[in-house]
Image (spheres, grey):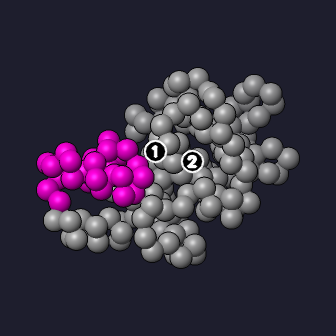
Amino acid sequence: MRANPVQARESARAILRDFGVKVAPVPVERIIKARGIVLQYAPLDEDLSGMAYIKDDIGIIGVNALHHPNRQRFSAAHELGHHVLHESEIRKAVHVDRGFRMLLRDDVSSQGVDPLEIDANAFASELLMPSELLTTALHASGLDIEDDAGIEALARKFRVSASAMRYRLAGRFL
């Protein structure tokens, strides 16, 4: 399987259009629940941010309750990306504890080498920091991307981490 971040971003934009999102922050929890996916928060190992799986034909997203709320939002959006883009994969993924089949959001997912993770990161980035809303915010603020305080303010507006915003502005998630 090859990564297709262009298609992943378009899938995120379609969800934003369908949900009528016009302002930041994007209501990722409401979007997940509106799609009939169960969203659960639980304490997980530090290196595990989230998981996506399907049990008894019910989509489930698990997010590490111990992580910062902004990281939780990105993890939730990332796992939604797996549900939207990789349903067949999360039905047959590695069998893990308690009989769940899941894909994990962990340190490997952030390295940018696994096609599924590349797609899910592109999806999450576009969902939480939509290019249209981000462009508008950048023009309105006149932000210099070297301005740390400005990036942090923009990250707060979108309820993402400053590092996620830097990645987005640097084009790594574009």
Q: Residue at x 68, y 48 (%)?
A: 39
| Amino acid type for the residue under numbered disc 2 | Ala
Q: Is residue 115 visible?
A: no
- Of label 2 and label 1, which has the lower sequence position? 1
Residue 24 coordinates in the image, percent (x, y): 42, 64
Q: Residue at x 54, y 61 (%)?
A: 27
| Amino acid type for the residue under numbered disc 1 | Asn
Q: Nearer the viewer, residue 5 or 139?
A: 139
- The quadrant in which the C terminus is found is bottom left
Residue 126 coordinates in the image, percent (x, y): 42, 59
Discs 2, 1 touching: Cβ within 8 Å: no
Q: Is residue 64 visible?
A: yes
> What residue is pinned by disc 1?
70
Overall secondary structure of the magenta section: helix
> What residue is pinned by disc 2?
76
Residue 2 belongs to the span the image colors magenta? no
In 3D space, how far apart are the residues under numbered discs 2 and 1 (Cα atoms)?
10 Å
